Amino acid sequence: MLEELKEEEIVNKIGGRFKLSTLIQKRLVQLNQGSRALVSVDTHDKMSIVLQEIVQDKIFLNMENEIETVDDLDAIVAASEAPELDPSDL
C-alpha cells in the first residue's frame, strides 16, 4: 500500500506531494462519512482504497482543491456537448 506513495509516478500524477496529501486526506474524510469506494479491492483499509482510486484515475483535485471523480467530469462534459443535429432539421 505505502509503496505507491514512495513512487514519484503517483506524486507527479497529482501534481506534487502537497496536492497528493490533500487529495488523500479529503478522500479519507469522504469515505469515513460513508461515501462508497470507486474501485473494487479486497480490503477494508481506506488508505488502500484511496490509493487505488488515485492509481486508477478515479479521483482528482479540481482547481479549487476539491475532490472530483471521473463520473463528475463525464457529467460536466456531457452537459456541455452540443446536441447532434439531424439533417432533416436543416
Image (cartoon, rainbow, N blue to C red):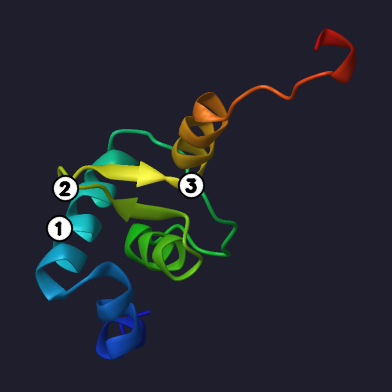
Residue under the image location 60 percent in, 25 percent down: 82
| Residue under the point 76% across and 21% down | 85
Say if 67 sits above or below 34 in the image: below
Q: Earlier in the sequence, mark 3 or mark 2?
A: 2
Which numbered disc, 1 or 3, marks the residue that appears first in the sequence? 1
- Looking at the rendered structure, the kind of residue marked 3 is Val
87, 72: nearer the viewer: 87
Determine contact: label 2, label 1, CB under 8 Å: yes
In the image, is 58 to the left or to the right of 63? right
Determine whether label 1 and label 3 are within 8 Å by CB.
Answer: no
Q: CA distance from mark 1 to mark 3?
A: 18 Å
Numbered badge on residue 70: 3
Please state which of the two labelled residues, at mark 1 or mark 3, is closer to the viewer. Answer: 3
User: Label 1's element?
Assistant: helix
Which residue is tagged 2?
Answer: 65
Q: Nearer the viewer, mark 2 or mark 1?
A: 2
Q: Which residue in the structure is indicated by mark 1?
A: 22
Inter-mark Cα distance, 3 to 2 = 15 Å
Q: In which quarter of the view is residue 39 placed?
A: bottom right
Q: Give percent across and percent down for residue 32.
A: 28, 41
Q: Where does residue 22 sit, x and y in percent of width and height?
A: 15, 58
| Quadrant of the rendered image containing residue 73 | top left
- Compared to 48, does 63 lie above or below? above
Q: Amino acid at mark 1?
A: Thr
Compared with residue 39, is residue 42 higher up or lower down, i.e. above or below? Answer: below
Which amino acid type is marked by label 2? Asn
**Residue 37: percent from left, percent from top:** 48, 47
